[in-house]
Image: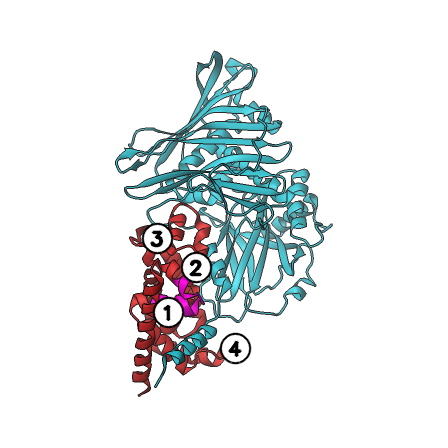
Chain colours: A cyan, B red
Amino acid sequence: MTSEETIKEKLGELAQAISPDEKLIENVMSRLDTKTTSGFSAVTTQNIWRTIMKSPITKFATAAAIMIAAVLLITILDKSAAPAYGITDVPELFRKARAVHIQGWVHFNLTDNGRKVPKAPVERWIDLENGRARFTGTIVNAGPEQVKVTIKETILSGQYKMVIYHGRKQAVFYRMSDYQRMLKTHDCLQDMFGRLFDKIEDLHNIVKTGREEIDGVAYDVWTCEFKETASDLERINRYKYWLSPTTGESGRFQSWYKNGDEPWRLGHDYYAIERDVEIPEGIFAMEIPEGYEAVNSKDTAGPLELNEQGYLGKSGLAVDARISFTLSDGSVILGWRGVDTESTVSTGELFEELKFGGALPKLPIEVYALKPRGWTGNTAYTARHLVCTRKNDEVIEWSLYVPDGPRLKRSEMFGYELLCRINSERQVGRWPGMSVDHGIKIETEEDFDIWVRGAMAELSDDGKAPDEVSYQSVLQLAERTRESLAQ
Amino acid sequence: MRTDAELINEVLDGEKETFAVLVKRYERPVRAVALDVLGDYHSASDISQEAFVKAYEQLAGLRKPEAFGAWLMKIAHRCALDSARKKSREHRLDMKAAAFIENPDGQLDEEKQRLLAAVVKLPMSEKQVVMLRYLDDNSVKNVAEIVGRSVGTVTKQLSRAHKRLRKILERSEK
């Protein structure tokens, strides 16, 4: 006879036999990076780029960023008007800015139980001099009948990040390093202005379409239209940018879009685009609004890890992609780990004989090449080892990936697919797809030192980047690799 | 202890990271369900991942968030069956045998396998509380909070489950 106590005891023993699997949580959450819940499109300011590519709503938001980016870099000018400030002057004006403020609205083409969803406010304060930012994000949960839009605000200042969720009246703190704060502040500006800078190469038809007055100031109105590329949507975007020819000030920006034969719809409407504006006192103060619950405090805030690109594991093997950069010649640097999560054997010795420019370490799983995501051509990116860094008993491999074909525009692809090789006896089956985004554009030696060497230092126990890696040495290696691939 | 329903609302509110709490809460029960069907640890772990991802994708369609655990385990069971069907019977048997031999801890002997099979056969409401109570090591009070039932109800369900398990095991021993 089996007593109830025996049953309990046996259940306890069964529980012991099925031990917790912490990696499973990581693996699942990593896979969710590219997913949204069915019928809903969740849009957050975190990881916005990946979300942008998945959701029609956020593609629309992207249009806003593209428009500004387009306006900033378009090269076609109406020479006949010979203005003091033309559209091509705008990028430099923003580059020199100490602070930027943007305010406006995002419109939704959605109905909630038959009623139109109201527009939501958009606001960003970016203190470029001191690396601080405060920005809003909209969280859109759109089902077939119900739609819920809530706002959250993120503040980056000093060693902390604070997120205020206005929907559920909560605030959460995170600790961050100087590098991470700089990175997030950069992303904050890029999300608005620059993430798709290369996209403007598709916008060859921007023209001055008129002149309008806003609050007594005359602005030239610049307009362009373009189709989405690398998209299955038949979407046309129209951007309008109001620019003062006498002062170079921006008066307004609107993005519109049109799907097929549908009418034009307004997406973003920014009525304030200000450079070098005086930042109001207290804008970066991390104060919990009255009536809001603090989930934690600065003292108990957990650290943010430098892990910008995601983690994917399967059957005891995992790729941990930390950060990526695209260099001026189109080659890519990726900081990553390839680990056997169930092995206790150190992979340290695999890094001992490696040479700068040589083969990658034979890690249990190896990112041996990259492929442009969303690009139908045959271009592949061949890998070369740069250096490795060690932090908290983890070894991070820094690899250079050099394209074997012409340099692709950012607008022609959505980042890079990781091609992985398994150097382990584990039976893994088909390795799931994983991709990383373009990362920060590295155009100069200064960019390289700040961002690439900065990331290497961030992921080193001693806080220093290896001496042998410099902008020049990496570009020269890329050139040599290209030559060998051409032979 | 936040209820499943609260956590699900938060996930649907756009807080993807909250889903990790649900994964942590149910990873062992889900793996147990998959393990019962597939018989090997790696496959069970892979299928558990699939089940969680599928659940996340279908979360908006879940009409009763308080029934998340039971619903999730059904998904895991379906995923495991689909996976099992794809493998040949011989292959599956080989894998089962290999799992017993190769597993470093040598767990899941015949007796445990029988018990697990019995747990999986329990009615859904009882299976959920048994899994949360034993596999996830929650107190009865915590289980009650997670599933949104009273402590009394959970206690009764556990008691009924113990009796049912006893009968199933006694039958299988004969």
Marks 1 and 4: which is nearer the front?
Answer: 1
In percent of width and height, residue B16 lies at 44, 50
Residues at circles 1 and 2 in contact by the CB criterion of under 8 Å: no
- Give the vertical position of B107 relative to A249 (above or below): below
Residue A302: assigned label: none
Q: Residue furthest top?
A: A216
- Give the vertical position of A28 relative to B83 (above or below): above
Of the pair A80 and B16, the residue shown nearer to us: B16
Q: Amino acid at mark 4?
A: Pro
Marks 1 and 3: which is nearer the front?
Answer: 1
Q: Secondary structure at mark 3?
A: helix
Tell me if residue B21 is in the magenta stretch: no
In percent of width and height, residue B157 lies at 32, 68
Magenta part, dominant SS: helix
Residue found 63% across the figure and 43% down from its top: A159
Q: Alpha-carbon distance for marks 1 and 3?
A: 23 Å
Q: Secondary structure at mark 4?
A: loop
For the residues tagged 4 and 2, is the chain the same? Answer: yes
Q: Which residue is mark 1?
A: B130
Marks 4 and 3: which is nearer the front?
Answer: 3
Total marks in image: 4
Q: Secondary structure at mark 2?
A: helix
Residue B59: assigned label: 3
Q: Alpha-carbon distance for marks 4 and 2?
A: 25 Å
Q: Alpha-carbon distance for marks 1 and 2?
A: 17 Å
In primary-sequence order, the first of circles 4 and 3 is 3
Q: Chain of mark 3?
A: B
Q: Alpha-carbon distance for marks 3 and 2?
A: 13 Å
